[in-house]
Amino acid sequence: MYKLIVTFLLSFNFLIAQNIQSIFLDSANKIPLLTFDKPTDIQELLNQEVVKGQMFNFGKFVLCDISSSEHGLWTEVDGGKVWTLAIEAKNAKGISLYYDDFWIPSSGELYIYNPMQTQKIGPFTSKHNHSSGLFATEVIHGEILVLEYFQPEYENNDLKLSINRFAYAYRDISGGQLNGYNSSDECQVNANCSEGNTWENQKMSTCRIQIGSGWNVGLCSGALINNTLNNCTPYVISADHCFSGGDISANGLNQSIFYFNYRSVACNNSVPNNTYSVTGCTKKANSGGEGNVGDPDFFLVELNSYPDFNPFFSGWNRSNIPATSGVSIHHPSGDIMKISTYTNTLSSASGLGFGNDNTTHWRVFWSETPNGHGVTEGGSSGSPIFNQNGLLTGVLTGGSSFCTATNQSDIYGKIWHAWDQVGNSNNQQLKPWLDPANTNAVTLNGIYCNQSATVTAAFTSSETNVCLNSYVTFSSISSGEVIDYSWEFPGGTPSFATGLGPHNITYNSPGIYDVSLSVTGTENSDQYSINDHIKVAANLVELDFLPDCYGQETSWELQNANGQVVYSVANGYYPGGNTAQDMEPNPENIIENWCLMDGCYKFVVEDEYGDGLYGSQHTCEFDGDFTIYDNDDNILVELNEPNSDFGDDISLNFCVESGLSTSNHSTNTTQFDLFPNPTYAAFVLESKINGQIKIYNTILQVVHSSVKNDFKHSIDIQDLDDGIYLIEFNNSIKKLLKQ
């Protein structure tokens, strides 16, 4: 192979580059030019289909043997000397250089640019040297690039560059060229349109990733992600399938390029500026299954160097509670940063291919917004999906949404599953890296790491939904030089604390409670509060579930009054197959314990085969059933064996209450009636006297107030959530159920 490469290089003609704007030289005629022909198989590569769920290939590696010792020209200038070399790849849309030896002396500066310097990267300095000697530099758009290196006269060491291959870009990924954005489809929405106004932090976290795989060079997306030490370790999360399921070599990782802030400066298609890149990383953990069924498709790396700007490290939510709205920020087809919006609650889904494991991914349907209808494309793989609170909950595996099919869905591998459910070793889980402090935090806020004396208050909690008499651990993730911490935990014990923490706070009364942290530094003070952050439930509810012999077919969800999934079990969770050969001959009762807030719930059971729990119609000897009990062992809902044949699904409703306190309210003898009760939209309060009416929710907050001035007073409550309410009239109280 070596002889072939040398022979190929010696066939080049050394030309003089024309029309080049040099940085340090007064004459472009001093810059030599190496020319490479267009690879013969480019048209074949262009004809290959771009497949979502795979890396977006845009380039092909071309072998070469270029070095600073054998090629280029040294020129003496005032204060030092300059080395220059121009490289031409005929008809290329861009060129990216890959170095098998990259070493810059301590005072040297390397720049790379296109002939007219409309695109310039650098300076590359000694801080970019890596112990491996490997490096890569980002794509210079067009068919010619120029390398120009300045070495001061007092520097005794010479530049050492060896380029053994370059990426020949046969697809246009320029994004910022004024002649158009032809790499992504027209429906995509630029991240700096109005849809992205409240997502600036997340945009400062998202990156485009250039990866070499075999002879191909492609693009994916990813994001910087925070950890519980709040120490700004530059972890980037992306998709496993972008890195060939972990088969990528250490050399390949050291030459991966991460582009940050690659976006239009406005909503219109304008030239990106202030783009930053980092080359090289090391693998920390990955799922290994490339997003197939049962695999959450994650790949976590640590960058070789800290980004040269003030990036945002995204926070995360590792719970299995689906987000109700949010966005994904990504680089479809390698284009400038785009944003896709969803306004419907996510649902659980399986990975790519066939199987019944519907626990590993979030399914999302995209919404139309004022500036388009964002979807995903090849190159979007690995991009983060954020929930309504701006927290990262998954990374993109693939899907079927397109600009021509905006009603189709995409799937994102869950942080919940990637956390600790893939394998038992550190290189198979996110938990050891994102929670090195072992806080067991379920959520973590994102941070900027400017290392400033200016303080910014922030905290994380181990739980947000707890049972009565349980404790929550609170930890500060404030930034800056904090000298004083002041915590407030209304409803908790203790209700006040000082110091960094962590603090364990016990909640002995049901309700919804705020949390606040104030920090003081040498330059400023700051406060961070989250309203309704801790939800304390007093209802310990038990599900007694007996599947039939074909338990693999069965799944269920418990939904609250807002339709959010509180607890769930996916297909394949219970033992038993879907044929007589792999059925479970003696299934056992399975007990699930739920901790629920006061309110109304829907229990939905689905059967994949469509015969409910009616196993006896086949080769099973009995049918399944289930019962849900409250704190006092009262039956809330049940399904007996005679009713087990419910077909595809069955939905049952129930309500729970913890015995609301009315101690602050007197109960005189004022008489009034409420009807209908329960109600779904409105009710009538009937009384012979007039007076003040107040409606309280389960934590005794007033949600309605009016004055009764007729015999039958009608009140519309269709805008209130389903649940139990206290109706107070002239200091007398009755309960009303809305469902």
Image (spheres, rainbow, N blue to C red):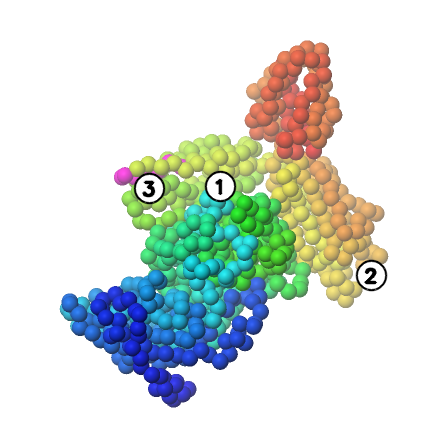
Can you identify the residue that label 3 sits on? 455
Residue visible at 75% across and 46% down in the picture: 650
Q: Position of residue 409 (x, y in %)?
A: 62, 55
Determine the CA span between mark 3 and mark 2: 67 Å
Determine the CA span between mark 1 and mark 2: 48 Å
Quarter holding residue 77:
bottom left
Front residue of this view, candidates 220 and 433: 220
* Label 3 neighbour load within 10 Å: few <14, some 14-19, many 20+: many
Q: Which mark is residue 290?
A: none
Can you identify the residue that label 2 sits on? 619
* Label 3 secondary element: loop
Q: How many marks?
A: 3
Front residue of this view, candidates 509 and 136: 136
Is residue 655 among the parts visible in the rendering?
A: yes
In the visual, does 155 lie left or right of 576? Answer: left
Picture layout, residue 664 above or below residue 72: above
In the visual, does 420 lie left or right of 644? Answer: left
Q: Quadrant of the N terminus?
A: bottom left
In the visual, does 265 lie left or right of 453? Answer: right
The region drawn magenta spans 517-523
Front residue of this view, candidates 368 and 19: 19
Determine the CA span between mark 1 and mark 3: 25 Å
Q: Residue furthest front?
A: 19
Name the kind of residue labelled 3 in the image.
Val
In primary-sequence order, the first of circles 1 and 2 is: 1
